[in-house]
Image (tube, rainbow, N blue to C red):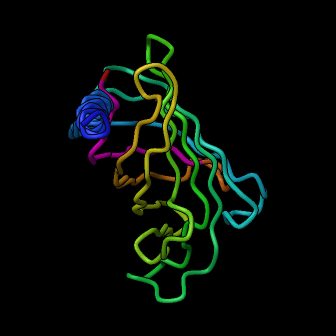
Amino acid sequence: MKLRQGLVFGIVFLSFVTIGIAQKGQPVHWAVTGSTHDLGMNGDIDEGSMGICAGKGTFGEHTCNTMFTGQPHPAPPAPNCYAQLAMFTHIQRFRNGDLLYSRIPSGEPLGDNYLCFNGLEYSGTVTVEFVGGTGRFEGASGWATWVFEGEFLEENYASGINEVNGMIYLNED
């Protein structure tokens, strides 16, 4: 009898714990403007690029930093789309100081992540996963797709706009 009561109590307790850490999905959208600089100083992104940006949308205004590298695309989706984003790490800082981290999922195929340029303009898309953060974003998960376009202001410096849409799951207390 005591064993049965203990099992029932354990199941009820685990149910409350599971409910207490449930995640609620929320659509996200950001409009972001920013600039990037080619770290290799040679007009491609195989040695890495760094970006700074600012945006607003879900969760309010934020600033952001991005690091990314590219590699030759094995099956370009369009003319001049020869680079595939091999690494993309992004940090967003919101007005209250909370940080949200995202990156290309490790081990994921890179086929949908690409960057196109023709010497004057660039465009592309990248899908990232949210990998936590600080404050309200601690333990966050989900995904977002960045669609971006811009122009080269100099050989190794570009400025552009981004539309970001996805779904985020935040831990609820």
Q: Which residues are magenta?
A: 158-172
Magenta part mainly helix, strand or loop? strand
Tell me how many marks there are: 0
User: In the image, residue 136 lies at what x, y percent?
Assistant: 40, 22
Residue 97 appears in the rendering: yes
**Residue 63 in the figure: left or right of residue 168:** right
User: In the image, residue 68 lies at what x, y percent?
Assistant: 62, 55
**Residue 139 in the figure: left or right of residue 4:** right
Q: Quadrant of residue 40?
A: bottom right
Which quadrant of the figure contains the C terminus? top left
**Residue 42 in the figure: left or right of residue 29:** right
Work out which residue is located at the far bottom of the displayed protein and give it.
75
Residue 30 appears in the rendering: no
Residue sitting at x 61%, y 80%: 72
User: In the image, residue 155 lies at what x, y percent?
Assistant: 66, 56
Residue sitting at x 23%, y 33%: 12
User: In the image, residue 112 lies at what x, y percent?
Assistant: 40, 72
Q: Nearer the viewer, residue 166 or 36?
A: 166
Work out which residue is located at the far front of the displayed protein and give it.
1
User: Vertical placement of 79 versus 16: above or below?
Assistant: below
Which quadrant of the figure contains the N terminus? top left
Q: Nearer the viewer, residue 115 or 80?
A: 115
Q: Nearer the viewer, residue 109 or 137?
A: 137
Q: Is residue 40 magenta?
A: no
Q: Quadrant of residue 48?
A: bottom right
User: Vertical placement of 70 versus 158: above or below?
Assistant: below
Residue sitting at x 60%, y 67%: 86
